[in-house]
Image (cartoon, rainbow, N blue to C red):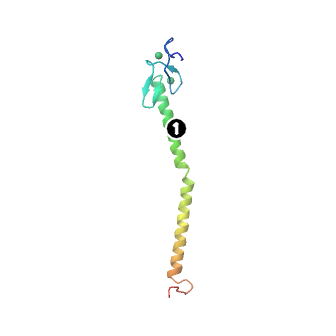
């Protein structure tokens, strides 16, 4: 096993999640995001994780934008088709009434 980054001679039991330094039980800094060598690394990781999350959300939101406008366009076309069929049917376009 590796030596602790801060204590020579002490066995490291874990690595910092952010910088990868080997840490002993006394040096590990436990946060909800993981175990780090100090507060700095924890904060850095948090910022990194937040940015990654933001990017993920942007990707999720950005992807279907064209799809969304396409569906909107499709909806308008379908509405126009339905309107046309209804008008054609009820106004008797061409003078014919089919249900008689
Ligand atoms: Zn670290
Ligand atoms: Zn240590």
Q: Is residue 54 above or below residue 41?
A: below
Picture residue at 42% right of the left edge, 31% below the top: 32
Work out which residue is located at the far front of the displayed protein and give it.
1
- Point out residue 22 in the picture as x, y percentages from the top left corner: 52, 20
Q: Is residue 33 above or below residue 10?
A: below
Residue in front for this viewpoint, 27 or 44: 27
The kind of secondary structure element at disc 1 is helix
Picture residue at 48% right of the left edge, 36% below the top: 50
- Point out residue 66 in the picture as x, y percentages from the top left corner: 57, 55
Work out which residue is located at the far top of the displayed protein and give it.
9
Which residue is disc 1 drawn over? 52
Q: Is mark 1 within 8 Å of ligand 1?
A: no
- Point out residue 41 in the picture as x, y percentages from the top left corner: 48, 26
The quadrant where residue 39 appears: top left
- Point out residue 52 in the picture as x, y percentages from the top left corner: 52, 38
Q: Is residue 63 above or below residue 80?
A: above
Picture residue at 53% right of the left edge, 66% below the top: 76
Residue in front for this viewpoint, 2 or 62: 2
Residue in front for this viewpoint, 21 or 75: 21
């Amino acid at each position: 096993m590796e030596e602790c980054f801060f204590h020579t001679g002490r066995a490291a039991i874990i690595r910092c999640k952010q910088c990868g330094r080997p840490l002993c039980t006394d040096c590990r800094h436990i946060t909800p995001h993981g175990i780090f060598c100090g507060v700095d690394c924890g904060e850095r990781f948090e910022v990194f994780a937040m940015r990654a999350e933001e990017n993920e959300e942007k990707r999720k939101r950005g992807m279907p934008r064209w799809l969304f406008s396409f569906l909107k366009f499709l909806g308008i076309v379908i509405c126009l088709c339905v309107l046309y069929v209804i008008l054609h049917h009820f106004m008797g376009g061409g003078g014919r009434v089919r249900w008689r």
